Image (tube, rainbow, N blue to C red):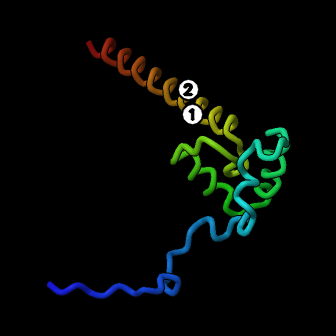
Amino acid sequence: MPRVPRPTDHTTLPRARHWSDDAACVGVETSVFFSGKGGVPAALDAAYAKTFCNQCPARDACLAHALTHREDYGVWGGLDEGERAELLRQARRAAEKQRRQERERAKADATTAA
């Protein structure tokens, strides 16, 4: 079967819209969102990076991306590494609590049915 030739100029190919196209940080150097550069304390770096997130229309999608893909470094969706880790811990604890309650309910239902 003959192969269809691929275009050589990939810049003219259309691309699907992405959540990051509407982000407030479009055009900002990505190093701004990753702490510890140039001797500046990480907290100050993160605070500056978060200023871009405050009114960003893509903030929720950005945070969802970071949580889904387990981004370990940088500010994503207005949260730094530690804040995202705490959010994941809280979600894990809530899920564990819900599973425990469901098991207890099922056990109680089985006891009353017997």
- Give SS at disc 2: helix
Q: Position of residue 59 (x, y in %)?
A: 68, 56
Quarter assignment of residue 4: bottom left
Residue placed most toward the observer, 21 or 113: 21
Q: Residue furthest front?
A: 38
Q: Which residue is mark 2?
A: 93
Q: Residue at the location (38% across, 15% down)?
A: 108
Q: Tell me whether circle 2 and circle 1 mark residues in contact (CB < 8 Å).
A: yes
**Type of amino acid at the residue the image marks with label 1:** Ala
Residue placed most toward the observer, 110 or 101: 101
Label of residue 91 in the image = 1
Image quarter (top left, top right, bottom left or bottom right) of the N terminus = bottom left
Q: Residue furthest left?
A: 1
Q: Position of residue 30 (x, y in %)?
A: 70, 58
- Give SS at disc 1: helix
Apparent side of residue 32 relative to residue 110 in the rendered image (left or right) = right
Image quarter (top left, top right, bottom left or bottom right) of the C terminus = top left
> Relative to 44, is 99 above or below?
above
Q: CA distance from mark 2 to mark 1?
A: 5 Å
Q: Position of residue 3 (x, y in %)?
A: 23, 84
Quarter assignment of residue 46: top right
Label of residue 81 in the image = none
Apparent side of residue 27 relative to residue 64 in the rendered image (left or right) = right
Q: Residue at the location (61% across, 57% down)?
A: 61
**Type of amino acid at the residue the image marks with label 2:** Arg
